[in-house]
Image (cartoon, rainbow, N blue to C red):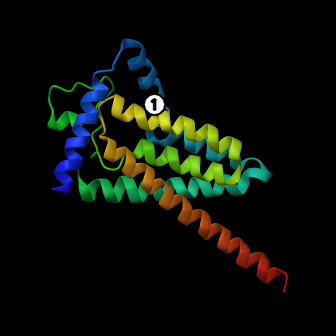
Amino acid sequence: MVTEALFNIDVSILFGVKNIRTPFLDAFFSMITHLGDGGWLWIVLGGILLCFKEHRQTGFILLFTLAAGFLIGNLVLKNLIHRARPFELFPHIKPIINLPTDPSFPSGHTLASFETAWILFWNNKKWGIFTFILATFIAFSRIYLQVHYLTDVLGGFVLAFIIAKGINYFVEERKENYYGNQSK
């Protein structure tokens, strides 16, 4: 019953968003969504952060978080849950981007984008807020472009928080233990 109700909400939102499509928004959200393709933007950002001593730890945490998210979200959960994408269930839906071939849940674009936003926010509020805004646009683009349901995006968001928080906590604990032991 709960899953059927959630699915009905997902479908209602999907078709509601479909009704607001315009050529301008199609072009805008197609461009925005490609910023999240394969996590390339976030990987490059992590690499850049590694180049600066004062941001090296943030870069390391970010890249480690992205790798964990890829393993847990894209390799394990997507294949374990194996949820069909909207255009696979509703053939009249015609996404305007290349059709993804992997399962739908969780949204990998959302996962990587919000992992980055959380890590940056915890280390630099200004960067984090900007990244949260961009991550929100990327996440919404996945629904707008009809390649994900809202619950795929929400799943990516929640998983991003759990993974980022876990890794950030792990690194901070290790640092605390290391520096705490150094002073003895």
Is 45 on the left or on the right of 102, as rendered?
A: right
54 up-or-down from 30: above or below: below
Give the residue at x 56% y 44%: 43
- Residue closest to the eye, 110 or 79: 110
- Residue closest to the eye, 14 or 182: 14
Give the residue at x 24% y 29%: 15
Of the 4 image quadrants, the one containing the C terminus is bottom right
Dot 1 falls on a residue whose secondary structure is helix
Q: Is residue 85 visible?
A: no
Give the residue at x 45% y 30%: 34
Q: Position of residue 24 (x, y in %)?
A: 42, 13
Q: Is residue 160 visible?
A: yes
The part of the image, by quadrant, that contains residue 165 is bottom right
Q: How many marks?
A: 1
Of the 4 image quadrants, the one containing the N terminus is bottom left
45 up-or-down from 70: above or below: above
Q: Position of residue 149 (x, y in %)?
A: 29, 40
137 up-or-down from 44: above or below: above
Is 140 on the left or on the right of 54, as rendered?
A: left
Q: Residue under circle 1?
A: 34
The amino acid on which the numbered mark 1 sits, given as a three-letter code, is His
Residue most extreme to the bottom: 184
- Crowd band around label 1 with a 10 angstrom C-alpha radius: few (<14), some (14–19), many (20+): some
- Residue closest to the eye, 71 or 88: 88
The part of the image, by quadrant, that contains residue 175 is bottom right
Give the residue at x 63% y 37%: 130
Q: Position of residue 105 (x, y in %)?
A: 31, 49
- Residue closest to the eye, 71 or 135: 135
